[in-house]
Amino acid sequence: MEITGKTKVCAIIADPIQHVKTPQGINRLCEEMGKDAVLIPVQVSSEELISVVNGFRAMKNLAGFVITVPHKTTVAKLCDELSDDAVRMGAVNVIRRSEDGRLHGAILDGKGFVAGLREEGIDPEGYSAYLVGAGGAASAIAYALAEAGVSKLTLANRTQEKAEALKERLRAAYPKLSIKIGTRDPKGHELVINATSLGLKEGDPLPLDVEGLTESQIVADIIMEPKETSLLKVAKSKGCTIQYGLPMLNNQLKLMVETMGL
């Protein structure tokens, strides 16, 4: 693919950036679909985030950008318009830039995660789910699990206030769903999910207590690099069914291309 002055430019912003897989996926998809577009990785610190987003507004050939850790909730506040899901979750992971520089945000993490499970033959309907995290991705996954029909959802987060806030938002949207705040122990749940960034860096602590994991449980991680995180390695050694992070992304790529109007 040749990049010219007519090529639509997109970006993904993150900090760190080295682990992201979106550029490869989006660029491969655009080539397969015959779209004259390219997506590049941009490492942006929290301190420089507002400046970069304002710069994106001014880029007339920018179609949009993807957002990942740790910027999903902050960028949502910088958008001019949000999808219904993004409003409920207070986070975004993809932005479409209109010709006048307005930013339209959406979040696809939850839909992509559930689609990734189903792609591997795992339908969460009726499952008891344990979810670690209460940030942007975790919130999206929590709503998607509720929509998919889990029977029970336990939320665990280092900051309990954030977990409580997510619980109240979920309860308002899904009043019949059994939701509670849990500890680091995922015992008694069929589906165990890490939706935090713990595992991105070597030496990160495990996001949950792995001692009680059993072979009857499914353990999923949303981290894509490394493919097999410390959590998944331990779960695999205990005979658990494991779900890698990449299927969640793969199921979002077409939606991202569509959202950015490529």
Image: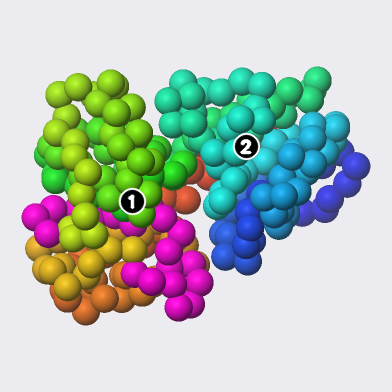
Judge by depth and name the residue closer to the eye, 49 or 114: 49
Q: Nearer the viewer, residue 172 or 148?
A: 172
Give the mark toward the camera: 1 or 2.
1
Residue type, label 2: Val
Residue identifier under label 1: 157
Quadrant that contains the N terminus: bottom right
| Residue underneath mark 2 | 75
Q: Nearer the viewer, residue 219 or 72?
A: 72
Q: Residues within 10 Å of mark 2 (few under 14, many from 20)?
A: many
Magenta residues span 187-206
For mark 1, give the secondary structure: loop
Res. 179 in view:
yes
- The image quadrant where one finds the C terminus is top right
Magenta residues: mostly which secondary structure? loop
Q: Quadrant of residue 161?
A: top left
Q: Position of residue 140 (x, y in %)?
A: 40, 38
Determine which of the numbered discs, if any, sits on residue 143 in the image. Answer: none
| Label 1 vs 2, first from the N-terminus | 2
Nearest the eye: 93 or 123? 93
Amino acid type for the residue under numbered disc 1? Asn
Q: Is residue 151 above or below residue 204?
A: above
Residue 70, image x, y percentages: 56, 51
> Is residue 44 found left or right of 205 in the rendered image?
right
Q: Who's the residue at 49% across and 67% down the image?
A: 200
Name the residue located 73 percent from the left edge and 34 percent from the top edge. Answer: 63
Q: Where residue 164 sits: x, y (%)? A: 30, 37
Q: CA distance from mark 1 to mark 2?
A: 22 Å
Determine the secondary structure under disc 2: helix
| Cβ–Cβ under 8 Å for marks 1 and 2 | no
Looking at the image, which residue is at 59% across and 46% down?
71
Q: Say whether residue 18 is left or right of residue 185.
A: right
